[in-house]
Amino acid sequence: MQDGKKRLKKVLKYFLICFIVFVIAFPAFMAFRISTGAHLTLRKAKNVKLALQMVEVEYYGHAKTIYDPSKSDNIESGVHAAVNRVLEDDGYYRLQKYDEKKREILELIYQSDHYLVTYEKVGDEDRWTVQYCLKIMGE
């Protein structure tokens, strides 16, 4: 009887240690995973911005612009195809603000997977913000 209690204590102690390790390790793993995904998505958003700037130079040569305020994403037809020639990307992006005189992007939104990246040019400073969006309910 005493031997069975010792064995039960050992098993319970083992499960308690495993549970504590899991409770500590899982949030650390998730934080690392989210942080890594945020860095990757930020890199993709910066690449999209650079590709848009390249396409803008190309359009400038044809006396056109990438900005079209009549479209829902404020991007001229054919720009997405031109950007996809430069890089393969599955994210969604839209221009929020564009300076037509200087022909530069002032605000950009990029969304990929659960991440939302916003770009904002304030004076001479570029501001990038990455947010993780957790979908709780829905289809």
Image: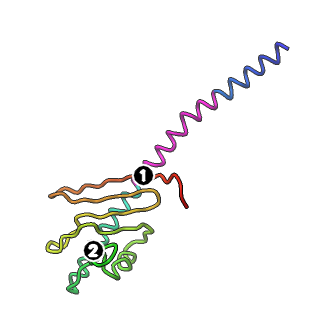
* Location of residue 79 with respect to 25 vertically, above or below: below
Foreground label between 2 and 1: 1
- Residue 112, by quadrant, is bottom left
Q: Which residues are magenta?
A: 17-39
14 or 76: nearer the eye? 76
Residue 116, image x and y in percent?
38, 58
Task: Give the residue drawn at x 18%, y 57%.
Answer: 122
Looking at numbered disc 1 in the image, what kind of residue is underneath it?
A: Tyr
120 or 22: nearer the eye? 120
Task: Give the residue drawn at x 59%, y 35%.
Answer: 22
Labelled disc at residue 132: 1
Q: Badge 2 is on which residue?
A: 54
Q: Secondary structure at mark 2?
A: helix
Residue 1, image x and y in percent?
85, 14
Looking at numbered disc 2 in the image, what kind of residue is underneath it?
A: Met
> Dividing the image into 4 quarters, which one contains the C terminus?
bottom right
Residue 67, image x and y in percent?
26, 76
